[in-house]
Image (spheres, helix red, strand yellow):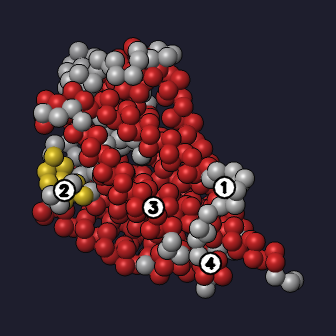
Amino acid sequence: MNMATAVKMPQAERSGSPPNLLLVVLCLLLTIGLLMMTSASLEIAGSQYGDSFYYFKRQLLFVGIGLGVLVITLHIPMRFWYRMGYPLLLVSVCLLWLVLYVGKNVGGSVRWLDLGVFNLQPSEMAKVFVVLFTAAYLERHIEKVRERWLALFILLGLVSVAVGLILLEPDHGVSGIMVVTVFCMIFLAGIKIGRLMVMLTLGIVALVSYAQMKSYEYLIARFQSFLEPCAPEYVYSSGYQLCQALIGFGRGEWYGVGLGSSIQKLYFLPEAHNDFLLAIIGEELGLLGVAAVILLFCLLVGKGFSIAGKAQQSGNLFNGFVAYGISLLFAGYSLYHIGMNIGLLPTKGLTLPFLSYGGSNLIMACFQLALLLRIQFETTAATRLSQRLPA
């Protein structure tokens, strides 16, 4: 067992020490998220539920639960998650299978389990559990993965079960980010370039095969609407959301129209408090507000990669792979949400971590951040302990 896991979390930092960057970013993102999500949802909440602050109250509850999960996770050693890698993958597969039979159908997709208090989205849990499983598998079989095809295909086969179930919902956005994250983790494990190219080729073949299962006319229409969302034949159908989002960015210009003064949230832009929250930020806070949000995510991902590198240097491969995987998830979600809102990527139901409305994604985002904080603590503790021990 790693010596760092036996060390308890500190009760408090020494006075005068700088604040933890991850905690600062977390506080800023949660504050901005509550503010902008509330602004984007006032009208729709008032019309649907008779309470303009309906979504704010629920999101505040999710923030409280998320912070509770964060505090609990901080006190759990990473070796526990290492041992739980396989069981967590099994839990993910069971939940993803269950949602296909008893899940809640919204907009033609079955992605949620109705728990009464809120809707649980198993794919949000699965993406993190797959990262933990992949990290544990890579640490156990690092040499086999680098040298033997069988170990590599076993890993990809187990992960593909979860990915396949998510595709059946269907949820192409989450499944795509999961696949890219796992591929990047395998690459960071030191796999040979030749093997990586074979994997990429197989991935492209699988993607093409899946696309051929869809209607050819449907694929052409979606691609055309992505290229020309404001064309007359698409502006009121598949290109409507993107057109309204671009109008919001155009109205915001540099400094925005002012907090709470958005027009697009007044029933023009669907899912303004969720999938297209960045467009409302651009309209009300302008380019400077969007740039501030992007900067916070850059700091979060950059710090995550720094923590991963230090964990690997200390010899703890599992912690390093987990930190890499979580950082890649944050990067994938934020990049796709930003690209989708400004028209660089196709429209998919991907939220912006910590900012968009939703219980599952917010709670799991807090869980991911807690893992990064725990890895940072264990790496720092291990480094200090090694410096005190005699050579």
Give x and y (percent) for residue 273: 30, 35
The residue mark sitting in front, 2 or 1, is 2
Q: Calculate the distance from the C-alpha at mark 4 to the C-alpha at mark 2.
A: 37 Å
Q: Secondary structure at mark 2?
A: loop
Marks 3 and 2: CB-CB under 8 Å?
no
Which mark identifies residue 70? 3
State the residue lying farthest toward the right: 391
Amino acid bearing label 1: Ser
* First reached walking from the N terminus: tag 3 or tag 4: 4
* Residue at screen point 38% across, 56% down: 66
Q: Which residue is mark 4?
A: 7
Q: CA distance from mark 1 to mark 4?
A: 22 Å
3 or 1: mark nearer the eye: 3
First in residue order: circle 4 vs circle 2: 4
Q: Earlier in the sequence, mark 2 or mark 1?
A: 2
Q: CA distance from mark 3 to mark 4?
A: 18 Å
From the top left corner, tell me how far across and down residue 247 is, in percent: 35, 17
Quadrant, the N terminus: bottom right
Quarter of the image holding residue 272?
A: top left
